[in-house]
Amino acid sequence: MKKIAMFTMGTRGDVQPYIYLSKGLMKAGYDVTLGTHPCWRGLVESFGVHFEPVGPDIDIEEETSIIRGRSKNAVMNILKTMNFIMKIIEGSSKEVYEICKGKDLIIVTHSQMGAVEAGVLGIPKVNVTLQTEMIGEKLRKQKFTEKLIGGFISKQAAKPTNKIRKIYGLKPVKSADEEMSDKLNLIPISKFVIDRNPYWEAKNVICGYWYDENEEYTPDEKLKSFMESGEKPIVLALGAMSFETAADKAKLDMFVNAFKKTGQRAVIQGFRKTLENYELPNTMIAVGSIPHSWLFRHAKCVIHHCGFGTTAASMIYGVPSIPVPHVLDQLGFAMQLEKKDVATKHIKAKDLSEQTIIAAIEELNSTYAVKKRNAEAISSKIASENGVNEAVRLISSVIEEK
Protein backbone atom coordinates (compact mmCIF):
# COMPACT_ATOMS: atom_id res chain seq x y z
CA MET A 1 0.00 0.00 0.00
CA LYS A 2 1.46 3.35 -1.07
CA LYS A 3 1.96 5.85 1.77
CA ILE A 4 1.11 9.55 1.52
CA ALA A 5 1.62 12.35 4.05
CA MET A 6 0.48 15.97 4.13
CA PHE A 7 0.83 18.75 6.69
CA THR A 8 -1.07 21.96 7.33
CA MET A 9 -1.16 24.74 9.91
CA GLY A 10 -3.87 27.23 10.86
CA THR A 11 -7.55 27.33 11.71
CA ARG A 12 -10.22 24.73 10.93
CA GLY A 13 -10.61 26.19 7.44
CA ASP A 14 -6.93 25.41 6.79
CA VAL A 15 -7.41 21.78 7.84
CA GLN A 16 -10.86 20.76 6.55
CA PRO A 17 -10.07 20.55 2.78
CA TYR A 18 -7.22 18.15 3.46
CA ILE A 19 -9.45 15.92 5.57
CA TYR A 20 -11.75 15.51 2.56
CA LEU A 21 -8.76 14.83 0.30
CA SER A 22 -7.37 12.32 2.82
CA LYS A 23 -10.68 10.43 2.87
CA GLY A 24 -10.74 10.29 -0.93
CA LEU A 25 -7.19 8.95 -1.06
CA MET A 26 -7.94 6.38 1.63
CA LYS A 27 -10.99 5.21 -0.33
CA ALA A 28 -8.69 4.73 -3.33
CA GLY A 29 -6.47 2.43 -1.26
CA TYR A 30 -3.71 4.73 -0.02
CA ASP A 31 -2.28 4.88 3.50
CA VAL A 32 -2.68 8.56 4.43
CA THR A 33 -1.23 10.60 7.29
CA LEU A 34 -2.40 14.14 8.05
CA GLY A 35 -0.16 16.18 10.35
CA THR A 36 -1.28 19.42 11.98
CA HIS A 37 -1.70 21.22 15.33
CA PRO A 38 -2.39 18.86 18.27
CA CYS A 39 -5.63 20.79 18.94
CA TRP A 40 -7.13 19.33 15.72
CA ARG A 41 -6.64 15.67 16.69
CA GLY A 42 -10.33 15.17 17.54
CA LEU A 43 -11.50 16.78 14.30
CA VAL A 44 -9.15 14.78 12.06
CA GLU A 45 -9.73 11.45 13.80
CA SER A 46 -13.53 11.95 13.76
CA PHE A 47 -13.28 11.48 9.99
CA GLY A 48 -11.27 8.28 10.39
CA VAL A 49 -8.04 9.87 9.11
CA HIS A 50 -4.68 8.94 10.66
CA PHE A 51 -3.46 11.97 12.62
CA GLU A 52 0.07 13.00 13.61
CA PRO A 53 0.58 15.98 15.97
CA VAL A 54 2.94 18.63 14.61
CA GLY A 55 4.06 21.75 16.45
CA PRO A 56 3.26 23.04 19.97
CA ASP A 57 0.07 22.03 21.78
CA ILE A 58 -1.77 25.36 21.54
CA ASP A 59 -5.27 26.52 20.68
CA ILE A 60 -4.40 28.06 17.31
CA GLU A 61 -7.66 30.01 16.99
CA GLU A 62 -7.16 31.60 20.40
CA GLU A 63 -3.52 32.44 19.65
CA THR A 64 -4.34 34.13 16.35
CA SER A 65 -7.23 36.04 17.93
CA ILE A 66 -4.79 37.41 20.54
CA ILE A 67 -2.58 38.67 17.72
CA ARG A 68 -5.54 40.30 15.98
CA GLY A 69 -6.61 41.93 19.24
CA ARG A 70 -3.30 43.73 19.62
CA SER A 71 -3.77 45.88 16.53
CA LYS A 72 -6.65 47.36 14.53
CA ASN A 73 -4.51 47.50 11.38
CA ALA A 74 -5.60 44.64 9.07
CA VAL A 75 -2.31 44.53 7.15
CA MET A 76 -0.24 44.37 10.34
CA ASN A 77 -2.56 41.67 11.69
CA ILE A 78 -2.08 39.38 8.72
CA LEU A 79 1.69 39.94 8.67
CA LYS A 80 1.98 39.16 12.38
CA THR A 81 -0.26 36.11 12.06
CA MET A 82 1.74 34.81 9.09
CA ASN A 83 4.99 35.36 10.98
CA PHE A 84 3.59 33.49 13.98
CA ILE A 85 2.52 30.54 11.82
CA MET A 86 5.81 30.49 9.91
CA LYS A 87 7.78 30.29 13.16
CA ILE A 88 5.71 27.23 14.12
CA ILE A 89 6.31 25.68 10.69
CA GLU A 90 10.06 26.31 10.93
CA GLY A 91 10.19 24.89 14.44
CA SER A 92 8.25 21.80 13.36
CA SER A 93 10.54 20.82 10.49
CA LYS A 94 12.30 17.97 12.29
CA GLU A 95 8.91 16.46 13.26
CA VAL A 96 7.76 16.75 9.65
CA TYR A 97 11.02 15.18 8.45
CA GLU A 98 10.54 12.13 10.68
CA ILE A 99 6.92 11.65 9.61
CA CYS A 100 7.94 11.92 5.93
CA LYS A 101 10.36 9.00 6.21
CA GLY A 102 9.17 5.93 4.34
CA LYS A 103 6.41 7.76 2.47
CA ASP A 104 5.89 7.40 -1.28
CA LEU A 105 4.50 10.90 -1.81
CA ILE A 106 4.25 14.18 0.10
CA ILE A 107 1.33 16.47 -0.66
CA VAL A 108 2.62 19.98 0.02
CA THR A 109 -0.42 21.95 1.16
CA HIS A 110 -0.89 25.71 0.84
CA SER A 111 1.14 26.13 4.06
CA GLN A 112 4.15 24.74 2.12
CA MET A 113 5.01 22.28 4.90
CA GLY A 114 6.97 19.22 3.80
CA ALA A 115 8.36 20.70 0.59
CA VAL A 116 11.99 20.96 1.75
CA GLU A 117 11.82 17.79 3.84
CA ALA A 118 10.51 15.78 0.86
CA GLY A 119 13.35 17.11 -1.26
CA VAL A 120 15.97 16.15 1.33
CA LEU A 121 14.53 12.62 1.51
CA GLY A 122 14.14 12.30 -2.26
CA ILE A 123 10.37 11.78 -2.05
CA PRO A 124 8.12 12.95 -4.93
CA LYS A 125 5.70 15.73 -4.08
CA VAL A 126 2.47 17.30 -5.28
CA ASN A 127 1.55 20.89 -4.43
CA VAL A 128 -1.77 22.51 -3.51
CA THR A 129 -2.48 26.21 -4.12
CA LEU A 130 -5.59 28.00 -2.85
CA GLN A 131 -4.71 31.54 -3.94
CA THR A 132 -4.24 31.59 -7.69
CA GLU A 133 -2.45 34.95 -7.47
CA MET A 134 0.51 33.00 -6.08
CA ILE A 135 0.94 30.99 -9.30
CA GLY A 136 3.58 32.41 -11.62
CA GLU A 137 2.75 33.20 -15.25
CA LYS A 138 5.76 31.28 -16.55
CA LEU A 139 4.50 31.18 -20.14
CA ARG A 140 4.12 34.95 -20.45
CA LYS A 141 6.95 37.13 -21.66
CA GLN A 142 7.44 39.72 -18.94
CA LYS A 143 8.53 43.32 -19.26
CA PHE A 144 11.78 44.39 -17.60
CA THR A 145 9.99 46.23 -14.75
CA GLU A 146 7.74 43.21 -14.15
CA LYS A 147 10.81 40.99 -13.86
CA LEU A 148 12.33 43.36 -11.30
CA ILE A 149 9.16 43.49 -9.19
CA GLY A 150 8.57 39.74 -9.59
CA GLY A 151 12.14 39.00 -8.58
CA PHE A 152 11.79 41.09 -5.42
CA ILE A 153 8.49 39.43 -4.47
CA SER A 154 9.91 35.95 -5.18
CA LYS A 155 12.92 36.68 -2.99
CA GLN A 156 10.68 37.74 -0.10
CA ALA A 157 8.38 34.74 -0.56
CA ALA A 158 11.39 32.41 -0.48
CA LYS A 159 12.59 33.58 2.96
CA PRO A 160 10.54 31.06 5.01
CA THR A 161 11.63 28.26 2.67
CA ASN A 162 15.28 29.25 2.99
CA LYS A 163 15.09 29.20 6.78
CA ILE A 164 14.06 25.55 6.60
CA ARG A 165 16.63 24.77 3.89
CA LYS A 166 19.32 26.16 6.19
CA ILE A 167 18.40 23.55 8.82
CA TYR A 168 19.50 20.84 6.35
CA GLY A 169 22.59 22.65 5.13
CA LEU A 170 21.07 23.51 1.75
CA LYS A 171 21.85 26.60 -0.30
CA PRO A 172 19.11 29.26 -0.43
CA VAL A 173 16.75 29.40 -3.41
CA LYS A 174 15.91 32.61 -5.25
CA SER A 175 12.23 31.74 -5.50
CA ALA A 176 9.84 29.50 -3.56
CA ASP A 177 8.89 28.06 -6.97
CA GLU A 178 12.16 26.15 -6.92
CA GLU A 179 10.74 23.98 -4.13
CA MET A 180 7.47 23.31 -5.97
CA SER A 181 6.59 20.01 -7.58
CA ASP A 182 7.57 19.79 -11.25
CA LYS A 183 4.75 17.26 -11.73
CA LEU A 184 1.50 18.65 -10.33
CA ASN A 185 0.04 21.66 -8.54
CA LEU A 186 -3.61 21.14 -7.58
CA ILE A 187 -6.00 24.10 -7.41
CA PRO A 188 -9.10 22.91 -5.47
CA ILE A 189 -11.47 25.52 -6.88
CA SER A 190 -14.27 25.03 -9.40
CA LYS A 191 -13.60 25.85 -13.05
CA PHE A 192 -17.08 27.39 -12.97
CA VAL A 193 -15.80 29.93 -10.41
CA ILE A 194 -12.37 30.83 -11.82
CA ASP A 195 -10.90 30.65 -15.32
CA ARG A 196 -7.62 28.91 -15.98
CA ASN A 197 -4.83 31.40 -16.68
CA PRO A 198 -3.44 30.67 -20.18
CA TYR A 199 0.04 31.64 -18.97
CA TRP A 200 0.21 28.89 -16.35
CA GLU A 201 2.36 25.84 -16.90
CA ALA A 202 0.47 22.60 -17.64
CA LYS A 203 1.20 21.23 -14.16
CA ASN A 204 -1.21 23.77 -12.62
CA VAL A 205 -4.60 22.04 -12.69
CA ILE A 206 -8.00 23.34 -11.51
CA CYS A 207 -9.60 20.18 -10.13
CA GLY A 208 -12.80 21.36 -8.39
CA TYR A 209 -13.66 21.90 -4.73
CA TRP A 210 -12.99 19.22 -2.12
CA TYR A 211 -15.99 18.33 0.03
CA ASP A 212 -18.03 15.35 1.23
CA GLU A 213 -21.49 15.25 -0.30
CA ASN A 214 -22.59 12.56 2.16
CA GLU A 215 -21.31 14.18 5.37
CA GLU A 216 -23.72 13.14 8.12
CA TYR A 217 -25.16 15.44 10.76
CA THR A 218 -28.27 15.34 12.93
CA PRO A 219 -29.21 18.61 14.68
CA ASP A 220 -30.24 18.56 18.32
CA GLU A 221 -33.89 19.17 19.16
CA LYS A 222 -33.33 22.84 20.03
CA LEU A 223 -31.78 23.66 16.65
CA LYS A 224 -34.23 21.44 14.75
CA SER A 225 -37.17 23.16 16.44
CA PHE A 226 -35.74 26.62 15.68
CA MET A 227 -35.24 25.80 12.01
CA GLU A 228 -38.79 24.50 11.68
CA SER A 229 -40.42 27.42 13.52
CA GLY A 230 -40.13 30.07 10.81
CA GLU A 231 -38.50 31.28 7.61
CA LYS A 232 -34.97 30.25 6.69
CA PRO A 233 -32.49 32.24 8.84
CA ILE A 234 -29.40 34.19 7.98
CA VAL A 235 -26.30 32.30 9.18
CA LEU A 236 -23.58 34.45 10.75
CA ALA A 237 -20.35 32.50 10.32
CA LEU A 238 -17.28 34.70 10.66
CA GLY A 239 -15.03 31.71 11.39
CA ALA A 240 -11.84 32.50 13.27
CA MET A 241 -12.68 36.20 12.91
CA SER A 242 -15.43 35.74 15.54
CA PHE A 243 -13.16 33.92 17.97
CA GLU A 244 -12.55 36.21 20.92
CA THR A 245 -10.18 36.22 23.86
CA ALA A 246 -12.51 38.67 25.61
CA ALA A 247 -16.15 39.64 25.21
CA ASP A 248 -16.87 41.96 22.28
CA LYS A 249 -20.49 42.95 22.93
CA ALA A 250 -20.39 45.97 20.65
CA LYS A 251 -19.58 43.82 17.61
CA LEU A 252 -22.28 41.26 18.32
CA ASP A 253 -24.77 44.06 19.02
CA MET A 254 -24.22 45.38 15.49
CA PHE A 255 -25.42 42.12 13.97
CA VAL A 256 -28.23 41.42 16.46
CA ASN A 257 -29.67 44.94 16.06
CA ALA A 258 -29.36 44.77 12.27
CA PHE A 259 -31.21 41.43 12.24
CA LYS A 260 -33.94 42.86 14.47
CA LYS A 261 -34.44 46.00 12.39
CA THR A 262 -34.62 44.06 9.12
CA GLY A 263 -36.86 41.32 10.57
CA GLN A 264 -34.39 38.49 9.99
CA ARG A 265 -34.12 35.24 11.89
CA ALA A 266 -30.51 34.24 12.50
CA VAL A 267 -28.18 31.40 13.47
CA ILE A 268 -25.01 32.74 15.10
CA GLN A 269 -21.69 30.89 15.21
CA GLY A 270 -18.68 32.02 17.23
CA PHE A 271 -18.70 34.89 19.76
CA ARG A 272 -18.34 32.34 22.57
CA LYS A 273 -17.12 34.78 25.21
CA THR A 274 -19.74 37.41 24.46
CA LEU A 275 -22.61 34.91 24.36
CA GLU A 276 -21.82 33.62 27.87
CA ASN A 277 -23.69 36.65 29.30
CA TYR A 278 -25.76 37.69 26.30
CA GLU A 279 -29.49 37.17 25.88
CA LEU A 280 -30.54 36.63 22.28
CA PRO A 281 -34.13 37.26 21.15
CA ASN A 282 -36.18 34.15 20.31
CA THR A 283 -35.70 34.88 16.60
CA MET A 284 -31.99 34.02 16.95
CA ILE A 285 -30.03 31.03 18.17
CA ALA A 286 -26.35 30.50 18.99
CA VAL A 287 -24.70 27.27 17.83
CA GLY A 288 -21.27 25.69 17.90
CA SER A 289 -19.42 23.86 15.16
CA ILE A 290 -21.91 22.49 12.60
CA PRO A 291 -21.01 21.06 9.16
CA HIS A 292 -21.55 23.58 6.38
CA SER A 293 -23.16 20.78 4.38
CA TRP A 294 -26.16 20.89 6.74
CA LEU A 295 -26.17 24.47 8.01
CA PHE A 296 -25.72 26.30 4.71
CA ARG A 297 -28.40 24.24 2.99
CA HIS A 298 -30.89 25.44 5.61
CA ALA A 299 -29.87 29.11 5.38
CA LYS A 300 -31.40 32.04 3.55
CA CYS A 301 -27.92 33.48 3.16
CA VAL A 302 -24.57 33.43 4.95
CA ILE A 303 -22.68 36.39 6.37
CA HIS A 304 -19.07 35.23 6.41
CA HIS A 305 -15.45 36.35 6.40
CA CYS A 306 -14.71 34.75 3.02
CA GLY A 307 -12.13 32.29 4.20
CA PHE A 308 -11.42 29.64 1.57
CA GLY A 309 -13.73 27.12 3.28
CA THR A 310 -16.83 29.29 3.73
CA THR A 311 -16.46 30.79 0.25
CA ALA A 312 -16.35 27.32 -1.27
CA ALA A 313 -19.21 26.04 0.89
CA SER A 314 -21.52 28.92 -0.03
CA MET A 315 -21.24 27.95 -3.69
CA ILE A 316 -21.15 24.19 -3.13
CA TYR A 317 -24.45 24.37 -1.24
CA GLY A 318 -26.05 27.08 -3.36
CA VAL A 319 -26.57 29.87 -0.83
CA PRO A 320 -26.03 33.64 -1.38
CA SER A 321 -23.49 35.55 0.70
CA ILE A 322 -22.91 38.83 2.47
CA PRO A 323 -19.08 38.97 2.52
CA VAL A 324 -17.17 40.62 5.38
CA PRO A 325 -13.49 40.02 4.45
CA HIS A 326 -10.95 40.91 7.12
CA VAL A 327 -7.62 40.27 5.34
CA LEU A 328 -6.24 40.35 1.80
CA ASP A 329 -6.82 36.76 0.70
CA GLN A 330 -10.39 36.93 2.01
CA LEU A 331 -10.97 40.04 -0.10
CA GLY A 332 -9.90 38.04 -3.15
CA PHE A 333 -12.40 35.28 -2.36
CA ALA A 334 -15.13 37.89 -1.72
CA MET A 335 -14.52 39.29 -5.19
CA GLN A 336 -14.97 35.79 -6.66
CA LEU A 337 -18.46 35.72 -5.14
CA GLU A 338 -19.31 39.22 -6.34
CA LYS A 339 -18.13 38.42 -9.86
CA LYS A 340 -20.52 35.46 -10.00
CA ASP A 341 -23.37 37.63 -8.63
CA VAL A 342 -24.00 35.29 -5.71
CA ALA A 343 -23.17 37.93 -3.10
CA THR A 344 -23.84 41.51 -2.12
CA LYS A 345 -21.06 44.08 -2.32
CA HIS A 346 -18.63 43.17 0.44
CA ILE A 347 -18.39 45.11 3.70
CA LYS A 348 -14.83 46.05 4.59
CA ALA A 349 -14.00 45.00 8.15
CA LYS A 350 -13.07 48.59 9.05
CA ASP A 351 -16.48 49.79 7.80
CA LEU A 352 -18.50 47.18 9.71
CA SER A 353 -21.40 48.83 11.55
CA GLU A 354 -25.08 48.32 12.22
CA GLN A 355 -25.84 50.62 9.27
CA THR A 356 -23.59 48.81 6.77
CA ILE A 357 -25.00 45.42 7.82
CA ILE A 358 -28.57 46.72 7.38
CA ALA A 359 -27.67 48.13 3.95
CA ALA A 360 -26.19 44.77 2.88
CA ILE A 361 -29.28 42.87 4.07
CA GLU A 362 -31.53 45.28 2.18
CA GLU A 363 -29.39 44.85 -0.96
CA LEU A 364 -29.64 41.08 -0.58
CA ASN A 365 -33.43 41.18 -0.14
CA SER A 366 -33.92 43.36 -3.22
CA THR A 367 -31.79 41.06 -5.44
CA TYR A 368 -32.39 37.75 -3.66
CA ALA A 369 -34.18 35.87 -6.45
CA VAL A 370 -31.31 36.46 -8.89
CA LYS A 371 -28.54 35.69 -6.41
CA LYS A 372 -30.24 32.52 -5.18
CA ARG A 373 -30.79 31.32 -8.74
CA ASN A 374 -27.14 31.99 -9.61
CA ALA A 375 -25.92 30.21 -6.46
CA GLU A 376 -28.03 27.14 -7.18
CA ALA A 377 -26.84 27.05 -10.81
CA ILE A 378 -23.18 27.11 -9.73
CA SER A 379 -23.89 24.48 -7.06
CA SER A 380 -25.28 22.13 -9.69
CA LYS A 381 -22.22 22.60 -11.92
CA ILE A 382 -19.81 22.08 -9.02
CA ALA A 383 -21.47 18.75 -8.19
CA SER A 384 -20.63 17.53 -11.70
CA GLU A 385 -16.89 18.08 -11.17
CA ASN A 386 -16.31 15.52 -8.38
CA GLY A 387 -13.33 17.54 -7.13
CA VAL A 388 -11.96 15.00 -4.66
CA ASN A 389 -12.16 12.15 -7.19
CA GLU A 390 -10.42 14.26 -9.81
CA ALA A 391 -7.64 15.20 -7.35
CA VAL A 392 -7.18 11.55 -6.40
CA ARG A 393 -6.95 10.58 -10.08
CA LEU A 394 -4.28 13.21 -10.73
CA ILE A 395 -2.31 12.29 -7.61
CA SER A 396 -2.46 8.61 -8.56
CA SER A 397 -0.98 9.42 -11.96
CA VAL A 398 2.05 11.02 -10.26
CA ILE A 399 2.54 8.01 -7.96
CA GLU A 400 2.21 5.57 -10.87
CA GLU A 401 4.69 7.60 -12.91
CA LYS A 402 7.23 7.13 -10.11
Image (cartoon, rainbow, N blue to C red):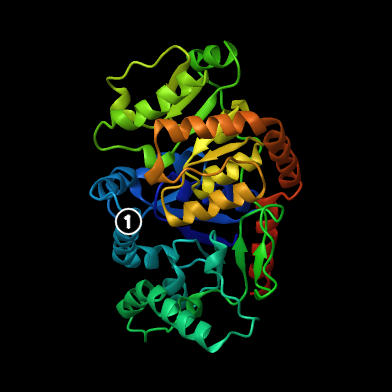
Q: Position of residue 157 (x, y in %)?
A: 41, 73
Residue at position x 39%, y 32% from top? 270
Packing grade of label 1 (10 A; few <14, some 14-19, many >=20) is: some
* Depth order, front residue of 241/25: 241
Taking 112 as reference, is 231 above or below it?
A: above
**Quadrant showing the C terminus:** bottom right
Residue 69 in sight here: yes
Residue at position x 34%, y 38% from top? 243
Q: Residue furthest bottom?
A: 144
311 displayed left or right of 113? right
Q: Position of residue 34 (x, y in %)?
A: 47, 53
* Depth order, front residue of 44/192: 192
Q: Amino acid at mark 1?
A: Thr
Taking 312 as reference, is 248 above or below it?
A: above
Taking 52 as reference, is 239 above or below it?
A: above
329 displayed left or right of 208? left
Residue at label 1? Answer: 81
**Quadrant showing the N terminus:** bottom right
Q: Secondary structure at mark 1?
A: helix
Q: Position of residue 144 (x, y in %)?
A: 53, 89
Number of numbered tags placed on the structure image: 1
Residue at position x 30%, y 30% from top? 250
Residue 216 in sight here: no
* Depth order, front residue of 341/127: 341
Q: Position of residue 155 (x, y in %)?
A: 40, 80
Task: Write down the quadrant of residue 249 in the picture.
Answer: top left
Residue at position x 45%, y 78% from top? 154
